[in-house]
Each structure stands twice: as structure tokens, then as C-alpha cells.
Amino acid sequence: MTKEGKLIIFSAPSGAGKTTIVHHLLTKFPELEFSISATTRKARGDEQPGKDYYFISKEEFLHRIAKKEFVEFEEVYSGTFYGTLRTEIDRIWKKGKTVIFDIDVEGGLHLKKKYDGNALAIFVQPPSLDVLIERLTARATDSKEKLKERFIKAEKELNYAPQFDIILKNYDLQTACNEAEELVRNFITKN
Ligand code: 5GP
């Protein structure tokens, strides 16, 4: 059995800026390591397999669900699965590091329940739904249909904020990154 370590969960609707904040924290804290999720979606832009995600087929994903290899998984968008492999958390804990997650809101709450006591769950709050929609549209990597699905999901997810340990406002990216650093520093240094 791997000795349990700590987990820091960043959740938010797509477009709230959590990926940018998580990447920033990874450059600041060598004690952190990113939990690479498995997904059935195709790689976007300069995403790299085994760095941003483990890109796997739907067939393999379903097979791994059946083998109970995931600590949590979700069909985040219709037909597209995302999940955290148990081996991924163990891999990071074995190094004595804290796991940091960039995960959707329901997945984040699952992990918080499962690892309560060892976990800090942070909800990244965008200034408004309108701003979120603007950011998602500007990203322009998705089809119109997929974008609409992301908007609908984002609106629903904003309501989950109070269930997290902390709500981190991302109205200004630099301020949000500074605040995130402070939160992480306090969490990883406490016993
Ligand atoms: P994207 O396709 O934009 O990379 O991710 C879509 C959403 O899925 C984001 O909110 C992202 O944080 C979330 N996500 C990424 N990995 C996981 C995971 O392992 N589990 C769950 N539940 N959501 C994930």
C-alpha cells in the first residue's frame, strides 16, 4: 500500500482559468505534481499524450471502468469520458509529492468526499457567466454544438461553488495566481 499523501483539487467550469492557475502553481512548487487524467477526447492544439492527458479509446476507457481502475470518472460531455486513475495518484504519492488536479466540478466533489481530510478543494470562480461564454467562444477549438454543451454545463456548475473548501475568484489572473500560491503554501506546509 502506498502511503497516503495530500491532494489539491482545482475545479471550475471550462474556461474559468483553472488550467492556467494549475500550470502556474506547478512552476512555483516542486512539491506538486499534476494528476494526468485519462480521456476519450482527441488531443487539442499542442497537448501531449502522457503530459496533458492519457488519450485512450472509448473501448479502453470502458474496459478500465469495468476493472475498477478509476477513483472517479465521468462522461463530462456526451460521449466523451474523463477520469482519474488510481495508479496516477499512487504514482505521485510514491514520490512523496502532493497531487494537484484540474478536474470538472462533479469529479472534484467526488474526490473531496473520498479523500476528505487529505484534500483541499478549490473552486475557481469566473467574473460572470457572460465572461465565461466569451472565453469559451474565443478559444474556438470546439464545434458550435460542443460549445453550446459547454455553456449549459458551465451555468449548472457555477451553482456548486459553496460545496468547495475555498472559492477563488479569478477576476484578474495575476491576483488569482497570487492567492492560489498562498493557499497552496499554507496547505502543503501544515501537518
Ligand atoms: P477539456 O476537454 O477542456 O480539457 O476538459 C473538459 C473538462 O473535463 C474540464 O472541466 C476538465 O477539468 C475536466 N476533466 C479533466 N480531467 C478530468 C477527470 O479526470 N475527471 C473529471 N471528472 N473531469 C475531468
Image (cartoon, rainbow, N blue to C red):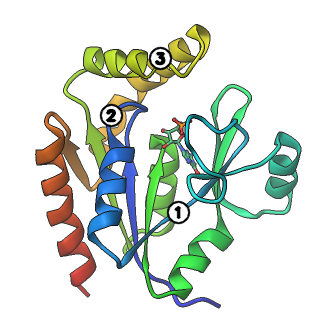
First reached walking from the N terminus: tag 3 or tag 1: 1
Q: Position of residue 40 (x, y in %)?
A: 73, 40
Identify the residue at image location x=36%, y=37%.
160
Nearest the eye: 40 or 186: 40
Q: Quadrant of residue 128?
A: top left
C-alpha distance separating marks 2 and 3: 14 Å
Type of amino acid under label 2: Ala
C-alpha distance separating marks 3 and 1: 26 Å
Type of amino acid under label 1: Ser
| Residue density around tag 3, few if under 14, some if 14–19, many if 20 or more, within 10 Å | few
Residue 16's mark? 2
| Residue density around tag 1, few if under 14, some if 14–19, many if 20 or more, within 10 Å | many
Mark 3 residue element: helix
Nearer the camera: disc 3 or disc 1: 1
Identify the residue at image location x=43%, y=23%.
139
Query: In the shown orientation, is residue 172 left or right of residue 89?
Result: left
Type of amino acid under label 3: Ile
Q: Quadrant of residue 117?
A: bottom left
| Residue density around tag 2, few if under 14, some if 14–19, many if 20 or more, within 10 Å | many
Q: Which residue is mark 1?
A: 35
